[in-house]
Image (spheres, coloured by chain):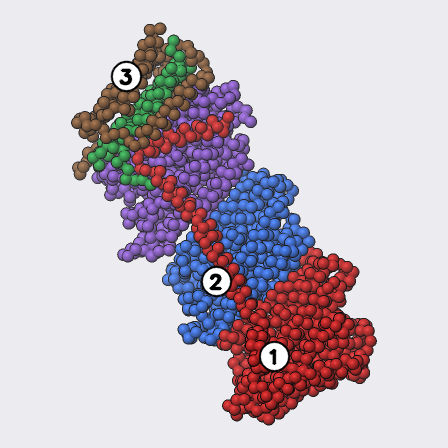
Chain colours: A purple, B brown, C green, D red, E blue
Amino acid sequence: MRDFTLFIPEYLAVGAAVAILAVELIWPRIRKDYLAYATAAGALGWLIAAIPYIGDSAGDFEGVLLTDDFTTYFRILAAGIVMAIALLSAHYMRNRTTTAGEYYGLLLVAGTGMVLMAASRELLTAYISLELLSFSLYILVGYLKRDRLSNEASLKYILLGAFSSAMLLYGISLIYGVTGTTSYEGIAEALDARAGGTDPAVVVGIMLIVAGVGFKVSAAPFHMWAPDAYQGAPLPITAFLSTASKAAGFALILRLFTGALVVDAVEWRAAIAALAAITMTAGNLIAIQQTNLKRLVAYSSIGQVGYMLVAIAAIGYGNVDTAASASSALLLHIVGYTASTLALFAALTAHYNRTGDDSIAGLRGLAETQPFLALVITASLFSFAGLPFFAGFATKLLLFQASTSNGLLWLVGLAAANSFVSLYYYLMVMRQMYLFDPPEGQTRFRPAPLLGALAGLLLLGVLFIGIYPQPVFEATDRAASALIEVSAWGLVPLP
Amino acid sequence: MTTEILWWIFAVAIVAVSAGVVFARTVIHSAIFLILSLAGVGAMYLFLTIEFIALVQFLIYGGAVTVLILLALMLTRMGVAGRPEPTTGVQAPFGALVAAGLMATLIGVAVATAWPGDPGGNAVAVSIKTIGEQMFQHYGAPFMITAALLLVAFIGAIVIARQEDDD
Amino acid sequence: MVPMENYLILSGILFSLGVYGVLARRNAVLVLMSVELMLNAVSLNFVAFSAYLDPDKATGIIFAVFVIAVAAAEVGLALAIVIRLFRNRSTANVDEAATMRW
Amino acid sequence: MAEHAWILAAVPGIAFIVMAAFGRNLPRQGDWLAVLCATAIFALFFAVLANFLNLGGDSWPIQNSIEWTAIGDFELNMGIAVDPITMVMLAVITTVALMVNIFSVGYMKGEPRYWWYFAVLQLFVASMLMLVLADNLLLLYVAWELVGLSSFLLIGHYWERRSAVEAAKKAFITTRVGDVGLLIGIILFWEATGTFNILEITEHVKNGAIGDTRLFVTMMFILLGAMGKSAQLPFHVWLPDAMEGPTPVSALIHAATMVVAGVYLVARMLPVFELAGDALTVVMVVGLLTALFSGVVAFAQTDIKKVLAYSTVSQLGFMFVALGAGYASAGMFHLFTHAFFKALLFLGAGAVIIGTHHHQEMGQLGGLWRKMPITAATFLIGSLALAGLFPLAGFWSKDEILHAVEGQGTWAFFLLSIAAIMTAFYTARLFIRTFLGKPRDEEVASHTSEVSPVMTLPLVFLAFMSIVAGFFIFHDFGSALGFPGGFSEFVFLHYPSAFHVDWGLVGLSTVLFVVGTFGGAWLYWNGRLDRSTVLAEWQPKVYEMVQRKFYFDDLYQFLIDRVVLGFSYLVSWFDRFAVNDTGVDGSATMTGYTGFVLKHLQTGKVPNYAMAIAVGVVALTLISLAVGS
Amino acid sequence: MDEAQGYVLVTALALPLLAAGVLLFVPGTQKMTARYFSAVIGAILLGLSVYVFLAYQASGDPLQMQLRWPWIENVGFLAENGISLHLGVDGISALLTLLTGVVAFAGTLIAWKLEYRAKDFFILFWILIAGVYGTFFSLDLFFFFFFYELAVVPLYLLIGIWGSTRKEYGAMKLTLMLVGGSVGIWIGIFAVVHQAGAGSFDLPTLWAAGQDGTITPDMQKIIFPFFVVGCGVLAGLWPLHTWSPDGHMSAPTSVSMVHAGVLMKLGAFGIIRLGIQLLPDGAEFWMPALLVLGTIGALYGAIAALTQRDFKLISGYSSVSHMGYVLIGLATLHEVGVSGAALQMFSHGVMTALVFLLIGALYDQAHTRDLSDFGGVAKVMPLWVIAYVMAGLANVGLPGLSGFTAEFHIFVGAFRTYPVFGGLAILAAAIAAAYMLRMFGVVFFGPLNPRWKELKDLSPLETVSAALLILSMLAMGLWWSPFTDRLANTVTSLPGVIS
């Protein structure tokens, strides 16, 4: 079945990307922030186009792509993220480059890549989609090409990205060798049909795949590119990296693991649990020592990835119900995390646009000079730490609760402990903002209205998810049940 | 039998030139070894009787990629002088260790796995028609995505490498 | 009568050599070449599997084609970045592109 | 009326609140209110007494209680129980309180915080009355603590003086140690019997609710409380120091009422003590040691109030001995008589202090009888009563105690006789050196004058009581006043027989009095020995030991400074360095340090990063292979 | 009726949050507005708290004024009533509600004289108070934890911004230790909700699961320490108490009041709610250990307080000691002991709030808290001294003040179950007398240090606050039954509590 109407929203997104490229080509002197607004409008159109798909019956494209509620969830998420990032970039990019069309176009393309990763039900498509996202990000990270850091970040990112892609591909090839197919359904059936026993090719293959996608979501020890890339990238792209890139990675992981690999859960769940443990611990411990805000956020987001991986481990350890509730909670957490991160970056961008300082100490006295931004930053950081009223509290608690099983209690406990460690460095940021007076000459200022409004809106979102997550939770629940519907549990009898 | 002997000769040669890529003292040598290695693997595809992919290998890798690499080497002015590359990194020995471990693992996997089908038999010739049908019908979607991907890479390379006024 | 394992072993050796190259070499272009070696090994794997195990659907072969295409694009993009690095710092040494750390 | 005897406590209680709140703004700072209150309770006491006697012995003890609190099976009632012992205590308290209140009007004139002084005095009276009215040990404990508080506040009344503060602190903490015992004892009783009511406890114990050992231990805890409050060895140290308070306070609290609370408690619990094995022997031994010890120490004191204080300790020892002998009536009777003459002596000392403008060292006094005849006369009566001159109050009660101890073995009797001699001896010394002879300090003598009537009047009344109080022991005397027989019959209805004068004992007592008094007179008469140097010249070390109170205070000081505070420093150090710096901050630092180490793995170099990826893959594979299979 | 009363709880919970929200939009320069507004809110809350306490019926179902608003349900792993805003009070929380009302109002008045960023202070203050109320009211584990955390977190800023001595260190340590403790609670929650298997955070449901063995006894024994250590940190459980001296030393006056007065009680309350009620088997197994720790804490705090030179350190250590009593009381699992623990929470709350109020009043003028700097303060600050003496006497357990009421119950409970520890606890009370009197002697009395001639006595606002607190102490000390009656039913209905 080749139903080309399934991806109308993505055509829109890519079309918008091309249009923006064309506009700048035709009219090179256009104010760069107009391009940002155009991108946001495009993303908005994309989002609106995605809405009719909510609750629609699953549409299958040749067995390689699937539009169901899960895909739609990531569609809306991607469109939202792109829209927010475009708005974030408006002021930031305005005077930093001579051409911005590619920047905004690539944002849209990257978002499309993310959606396709979520929609893929087949390894080749998943891989290509992943590369689509990655390529866009390589360029975006290095977009400030005369900025040594941006360039260095981009170099590291692409070299390691290529390296890990090779790993991923080798893993895929092994799985393909064992199962003779690359479609998730086929893999599940083939793995199930295997006559028991541990197959080294499967184990090594899965581990290589884990390395590949682990790199994408920056799970330790595959995370090392992340802090450097985050630090070097333009600020909005840092936000994009820590939201879209991770969300996409988890979309792929969820599809792949529930759709295919869960059949062989015994062979990877311990590794995923270990990966989760290492990731959250390393991320949080190293974050303590950071002085640069972007790096801090990078390590903190690595910690967050560790928490999210707990849900994946839980899927490996649990039954179909656990998988459904854990994926649902994970999707909820992703929304909360995304909203918090975007809010944080909206505020940081506003701050950076004024001071050009991205060190933690640069926030000194922000509560005096710009209390609203300080409040938004506080809210986001507290949301990361899982403190009440903010999204992180509800989502993290529900995520861990959904992931709890007797065998994984230790991991959940470790996650909780890590989340406590993380509070320390969030408080160190708070300390700069609230406990100290601003440096000499810093006076009160108003953030750009656009960023202020964006930050305020996202703050409301963070609060809403934190206080009353029911509606969002219901949505993620639908996405999760769509995911579970096409998962391996539907195909083969599992213990 | 001849095929086998020939195969072994090629296999050894590929390993040798591939080792050359990573061990060569100068970058330009590595590049040349890489061309040879890629060509060798292309030959392997011929052994597998899949000429289409061998062609792709020769064209894209042997042609486009290596030219690109050579170009880059010239642009970064290292190959031209033939200046010896500053030694390998300090972690080379550890890298060797890890690579050896990995190699052992991969070879182990290759040997120990009970592959389905008939791995002991001869490779089956795959018709270009099958490939074409599969690629444009079943794999139509990734094909289109790849189109976008190549466009992105293209634009990206231009954006990144483009010389601007103040460069 | 070359058995499939032979191809797999060859591919494993190539892949490992590529890994070694990435781990050991300091020139960015060389790192890229090593990655190419790895991808090459992957293609070989795919084609071998396809030829021996899955000749009907030829998934592996198509995968290999895509890998080659993507690899080419990746090299192009990466080299652009390396050149940009060289312009910025007059070096293509990855060890020296380590301003950001810790 | 008797069942509403709680009003007695309520009146001063309310007075306290009113005076504490508004006293400063009342005319004359409210002293009239205090006197009024004291008079009122004095009068009310007689009303209660009359009603009590009217109701007759069959209805005793008169009880009245309300439910106070209940949690599950734990129920607690609060109320009063009025029996003859209570009546005796009420008599003492109301009388002495009235006298002291009146006296204080003169004594405290012009002193700082005049109103506050009277307010706290009312608080004390209220608490003391509550103590003796309480029908259960918990309420008793509550009152017990409150009298301790009042005492603390009054000792520390002149808180600008460091020594007063120290004394108050010492009093509170020392008695507190005993109180810990008391509280433990009370709770142990509850644990065994499920009640706090004294009568019920007695019943339960009689029915064998508590095992022997356990009962003994419990009683020892109770005794600890009594010893603390009644300044028995080794808790006696606070009482002499408590003389830092205003002298009327010493009279009321530290001589007549509060310090006898311990005696009261033991008397109250005597039926239980009797069942508790050797507990009574312990009581007696404590009493004996205290009586002798403080008698000796009193020799070497030069401050008239200190002498009286040690005398008080000694007399409390007498009472304990009586109780230890099982003769509650004798102990209570001595308590009764002692209250009057010791209050008299303290108030007399107060009069001396006022009359001489704050001199109380015997070394600076002497020959005061000329200048202060009324004071001298009443003081003499008090002294003689204390020394035990026939037929003054002290004579009869001491006689009763000797009578009681007679049956306990000769050693106790012998030691107690010596203590009695010592009493007469130091009393003689005190009186002679203060009032007789020539003034030692002309400066002091020159502006000495008799005190005002508001102060002499209580002296006279108490002197009168010191003369007649002893006669309550007689059956006929009591009956004439409407009591069912004499003191003993009244207090303990089961007392074997009416009191008969044992003339042999009377003779002995008189001999003891004469020996002691004349010994003292011989030594000190007319300034023959100008200083208390007999002992000092004969045995300087022994004298020093006596003067330093057998080093008790020094020992305690050492224990507190070196052991308790040292331990505290140790704990503080441990808390800072071990728990906080090492345990808490240490783990935080370690976490940070781990992060510091980990972050240096992040070298910024691509090959290293790639290495991490490769190693990660290998490691994950190993984990999977190890755990999966 | 019950439902209608439930709205009182909702109001008490929402009001401070609302206040914080409103204050957010008050300009920072409008200090007086913020003050008056806060005072009014505080007064209303006090009224509501008193109402909750008085309206709580001593007989009948221990859980009263229940109200349930569905919140998150039928999604993910959550079943019907999975997470609901389920409010209600039992005797213990009714008592603690009263405490909160009293201390919060007193704290509001004390914060009056704060000049620096006064509005921000009140915002955080009200968030904290909302957290406290929420914890006491919540009958849903999710919201229990929600409010528990909410009460802890504002402390960092409250201390960090408005604090004094080593404020950054104190604030950081305090926050980290408390939140670190809540990690234990968090883990416990995961395990309990998972084990109960009802897909619900509703506490009564979970209690039932804990009591009928759905949460297996073995699991209970594993989980219990997590809860107790988690709550114990906030309750000053030895040896996790060290935030107390440092934190109190750094904290501004009204924060100290609320913190020592109310927040520490959250910990002990958590031990009841999550430990005794949720995990009866675990409680039975672990209580002796808690008893030992409580006793060590009681003695250790008292002994360490003996030689401290700083007012706040004395109070900090004394809090450790007194919270040790609470733990002893809980550990007895005896109806009187547990009641005593609840009473002690109230008693220590008002008493320590008063102490911190007074220390603050002195420090604001003298700018030193070193005992040896003072002397004869009674001369210039008589009201202050009287109030302090009252607090100190309550501290040493003098009858007639609340301390005795509480400690007496604890001792009775302890003697019924563990007599030796009961004896040690009483000993600690005796040591309390020593350190209190030592402080009295050095600071209040003796000749007046001329340096302090200018000290002013309590201001009218401070006097009102202090009077309110003293009144509370006296009320509990003099008339037990309103307090004990309300506790009796609740305490006897706790699982595993013996009589």
Secondary structure state at the residue bearing disc 1: helix
Secondary structure state at the residue bearing disc 3: helix
Q: Quadrant of residue D338?
A: bottom right
Measuring 41% from the left and 39% from the top, which residue is drawn there?
Answer: A282
Position of the N terminus of chain E, as image quadrant, is bottom right
- Pick the residue in front: E472 or D531: D531
Tags 3 and 2 touching, CB below 8 Å: no
Name the chain under label 2.
E
Question: Residue A202: x and y, percent?
Answer: 45, 23
Q: Foreground mark, 1 or 3?
A: 1
Farthest residue to the top: give it: B1
Q: Foreground mark, 3 or 2?
A: 2
Are labels 1 and 3 assigned to the same chain?
A: no
Up the image or down, D64 lies above or below B142; here it is below
Question: Residue A145: x and y, percent?
Answer: 24, 37
Q: Is residue D11 left or right of residue E124?
A: right
Tags 2 and 1 touching, CB below 8 Å: no
Amino acid residing under circle 2: Gln
Residue to which mark 1 is pinned = D299
Q: Quadrant of residue C65?
A: top left
Residue to which mark 2 is pinned = E308
Callout 3 crowding tier (Cα within 10 Å): few <14, some 14–19, many ≥20: many
Residue to which mark 3 is pinned = B39
Name the chain under label 1.
D
Q: Is residue E169 left or right of residue A326?
A: left
Q: Is residue A112 left or right of residue E489?
A: left
Amino acid residing under circle 3: Ala
- Pick the residue in front: A56 or E168: E168
Are labels 3 and 2 assigned to the same chain?
A: no
Question: Residue D497: x and y, percent?
Answer: 82, 76
As measured in the structure, the alpha-carbon distance from the residue carrying label 2 to the one carrying label 1 is 41 Å
